[in-house]
C-alpha cells in the first residue's frame, strides 16, 4: 500500500477535514436542488399543518443539515448507513435508544417496524 502522507496525521486533523467535507457536501446539495422541491414541501406543510416529514437516507445525507433550504420542512431524519437505524430530531438529538419507537410516537408516527 502506498503512503499518502509524509508524516502521521492526527485524529483531530482527520475529523476537521471530514467535517469540512460533510458541510460542503450538504451546501453543494442545497445549490443543486430540484427547482420545485421547496415550493412542493411548503405546499404540503401549508395544506397539512400537522404532517410529520421524515428523511430516510442510506448514508450521511441529512436535510436537517441543509439549513438554508430543506431543514425547516423535515421533522427528523432516519439514516441506515450503519445498519442500526439512527433517528434524529430537529436539533440533531439521537432518539433511538432513548425511547425507541416511543420517541417516534411522540412525533405522531403511528405504527411501523422501527428498530
Image: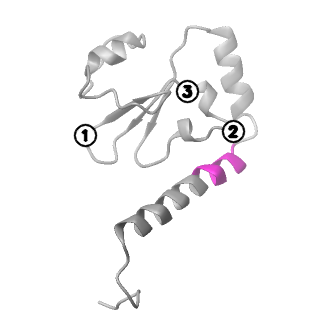
Secondary structure mostly seen in the magenta stretch: helix
In the drawing, what numbered circle is on residue 74?
3
* Disc on the earlier residue, 3 or 1: 3
Crowding near the residue tagged with mark 1, few <14, some 14–19, many ≥20 C-alpha atoms within 10 Å: few
For the residues marked 1 and 2, what is the alpha-carbon distance in whole angstroms? 29 Å
Q: What is the quadrant of residue 85 in the picture?
A: top left
**Residue at screen point 55% across, 41% down:** 65
User: How far from the left and from the top, in percent, is residue 8?
Assistant: 34, 82
- Tell which tag, 1 or 2, sits nearer the viewer: 2
Q: Which residue is mark 2?
A: 68
Which quadrant is home to the C terminus?
Answer: top left
In the picture provided, is 113 more to the left or to the right than 4? left
- The number of numbered discs placed on residues in the rendered structure image is 3
**Residue at screen point 29% across, 48% down:** 82
* Disc on the earlier residue, 1 or 2: 2
In the displayed structure, 12 sits above or below 106; it is below
* Disc on the earlier residue, 2 or 3: 2
**Residue at screen point 42% across, 10% down:** 108
Amino acid at each position: 500500500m502506498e503512503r499518502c502522507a509524509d508524516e502521521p496525521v492526527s485524529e483531530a486533523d482527520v475529523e476537521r477535514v471530514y467535517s469540512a467535507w460533510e458541510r460542503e457536501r450538504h451546501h453543494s446539495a442545497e445549490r443543486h436542488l430540484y427547482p420545485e422541491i421547496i415550493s412542493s414541501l411548503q405546499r404540503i406543510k401549508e395544506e397539512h399543518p400537522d404532517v410529520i416529514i421524515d428523511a430516510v437516507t442510506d448514508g450521511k445525507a441529512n436535510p436537517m443539515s441543509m439549513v438554508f433550504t430543506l431543514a425547516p420542512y423535515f421533522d427528523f431524519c432516519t439514516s441506515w448507513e450503519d445498519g442500526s437505524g439512527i433517528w434524529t430530531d430537529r436539533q440533531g438529538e439521537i432518539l433511538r435508544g432513548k425511547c425507541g419507537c416511543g420517541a417516534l410516537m411522540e412525533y405522531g408516527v403511528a405504527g411501523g417496524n422501527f428498530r
